[in-house]
Image (tube, rainbow, N blue to C red):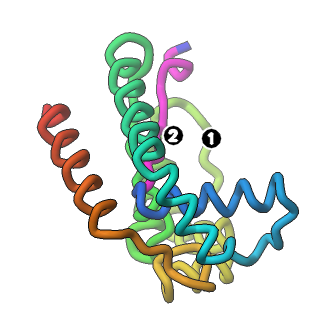
Amino acid sequence: SMFDSQVIYIIRNPTTVFPVHLNYKAIKYHHHPSKTQVAVDSWRKDRDLYFADGLQGWKDQIKEWKVSMKEVYNISMFIPFEHLVDATKGPELLKRLTKLLEDFGFPIVVADDDMPCVWYKALGKEILEQIDSHGYEYSDYMPGYTQEHKDLLMKELSSMVEEYKD
C-alpha cells in the first residue's frame, strides 16, 4: 500500500543523543539505576573515546535515510525530538502528525483541541518537567563537551549543511 513507503523520521540533537544512549546502555546492560545518569567521570571517559565515531554514526544514519528517501521511502514528516518534547511545539507537532495519518486513511479519535492533553499524557509530567528545567532527560549533571568536541561537531554539521542543502 501507499502507506508502506511513507516514513516519519524522528531526529535528535547529537549532543543529547550520545549521553542518553550511554545512560540507556548502562541501565540495560550494567544494572544502572534507571533514573540516574552514569557517573560524570564515566561520561567524560566514554565521550572522549567514542564521540568522533558516534558523530560519524549519527551522520551515516541521516545519509542512509537521505539515500533511501530517493530510492525506497518517502519521508512524510521530519520530527526533531527536541520539538516533540517542547511544551509549545510538541502539541502542534502532534496535530500535524494526526492530520498526516488522517490523510493516509487512519481514523482519528481525538479532536485537535484535545491534542495538548494527549501530548502531555503521552510524555508524562515527570519527563516534561525534567526537560523543561534541564533541557535533557536527566538532572544529575548536564553532559559537557570539550572545545575540541564542539569544533568537530560544528565542522561536521557545517559539512552536512553544504552536502544536504537541497
Relative horizontal placement of residue 164, taking residue 104 as reference (left or right): left
Q: Where is residue 103 in the image (x, y as percent from the top left)?
A: 46, 35
Q: Where is residue 106 in the image (x, y as percent from the top left)?
A: 60, 36
Q: Name the residue under label 2.
A: 102
Image quadrant in which the C terminus is located? top left
Residue 64: which quarter of the image? top left
* 160 over 111 or under it: above or below: above
Q: Position of residue 160 (x, y in %)?
A: 22, 39
In the picture as drawn, the residue positioned furthest to the right comes out as 31
Q: Mark 1 points at which residue?
A: 107
Disc 1 is placed on an element classified as: loop
Which mark is on residue 50? none
Is 10 contained in the magenta span?
Answer: yes
* 15 over 78 or under it: above or below: below
Q: As rendered, which of 88 and 104 lies closer to the eye?
A: 88
Disc 2 is placed on an element classified as: helix
Q: Is residue 94 visible?
A: no
Whether pointer 2 and pointer 1 mark residues with C-beta atoms closer than 8 Å, the reply is: yes
Q: As rendered, which of 153 and 105 lies closer to the eye?
A: 153
Is 144 contained in the magenta span?
Answer: no
Name the residue located 45 percent from the left edge and 52 percent from the top edge.
51
Q: Type of residue at label 2?
A: Glu
Q: Is residue 82 visible?
A: yes
* 36 over 51 or under it: above or below: below
Image quadrant in which the N terminus is located? top right
Q: Type of residue at label 1?
A: Pro
Magenta part of the protein: which range? 2-12
In the picture as drawn, the residue positioned furthest to the bottom comes out as 133
Name the residue located 60 percent from the left edge and 77 percent from the top edge.
40
Q: Judge the density around disc 1: few (<14), some (14-19), many (≥20) Cα neighbours within 10 Å.
A: few
